Image: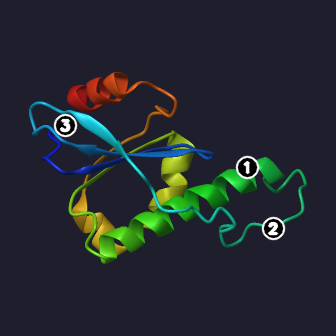
């Protein structure tokens, strides 16, 4: 995947978010960690209930889905504020699916690509290689 200089890369799962910026260029990706805004993990997806049963996700799954929605809200806000011009999202498959439900049309417009892989906790070099291979 070609990732332009200064593109923001969000690496997430249902519990953790890491943001990076590409200091390199589209052909030579060099990621630098950048701080993220606070994530509001209380955003329970619509239709979800707080009680657990066989038909409903357990509380930990609801917490992960809420965190995923909080990530998307923060990214939407940064895109709308003009802080993110190009975005790549790398997330665990379930997290990515939850996030997609809440993409703002402006976020979709700046989204260069997505990788449905869980790379949270991996080294910067591993993330760079995954981007280059995509």
| Residue in the image at 88% along x and 50% along y | 54
Left or right, residue 133 beside residue 45 = left
Name the element at disc 1.
Answer: helix
Cα–Cα gap, marks 3 and 1: 31 Å
Can you give x and y, in whole percent of width and height, for residue 40 in the image?
62, 66
Residue 101 seen by the camera? no
The Cα–Cα distance between marks 3 and 2, rounded to whole angstroms, is 38 Å
Q: Is residue 85 left or right of residue 96?
A: left
| First along the sequence among labels 3 and 1 | 3
Real-space Cα separation, disc 2 to disc 1, in angstroms = 11 Å
* Residue 56 rendering spot, x and y as whole percentages: 81, 57
Q: Disc 2 on helix, strand or loop?
A: loop
The answer to whether residue 21 is left or right of residue 17 is left
Residue 59 seen from this side: yes
> Callout 3: 10 Å neighbours few (<14), some, many (20+)?
some
Above or below residue 3? Residue 78 is: below
User: The N terminus lies in which quarter of the figure?
Assistant: top left
Image: 108 above or below 128: below
Residue that mark 3 sits on: 1
Q: Nearer the viewer, mark 3 or mark 2?
A: 3
Residue at 31% x, 70% y: name it: 79
The reply to whether the C-beta atoms of the residues labelled 2 and 1 are less than 8 Å apart is: no
Could you tell me which secondary element the residue under label 3 belongs to? loop
Give the x, y percent position of residue 57: 78, 53
Residue underneath mark 1: 61
- Disc 2: which residue: 49
Residue drawn at (57%, 56%) of the image: 68
Residue placed at 55% from the left, 43% from the top?
13
């Amino acid at each position: 995947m070609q990732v332009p200089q200064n593109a923001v890369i969000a690496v997430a799962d249902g519990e953790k978010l890491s943001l990076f910026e590409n200091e390199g260029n589209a052909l030579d990706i060099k990621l630098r960690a950048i701080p993220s805004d606070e994530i509001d993990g209380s955003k329970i997806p619509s239709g979800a209930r707080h009680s657990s049963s066989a038909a409903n996700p357990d509380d930990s799954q609801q917490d992960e889905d809420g965190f995923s929605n909080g990530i998307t809200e923060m990214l939407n806000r940064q895109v709308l504020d003009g802080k993110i011009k190009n975005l790549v999202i790398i997330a665990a498959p379930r997290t990515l699916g939850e996030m997609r439900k809440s993409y703002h049309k402006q976020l979709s417009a700046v989204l260069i690509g997505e990788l449905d892989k869980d790379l949270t906790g991996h080294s910067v070099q591993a993330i760079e290689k995954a981007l280059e291979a995509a």
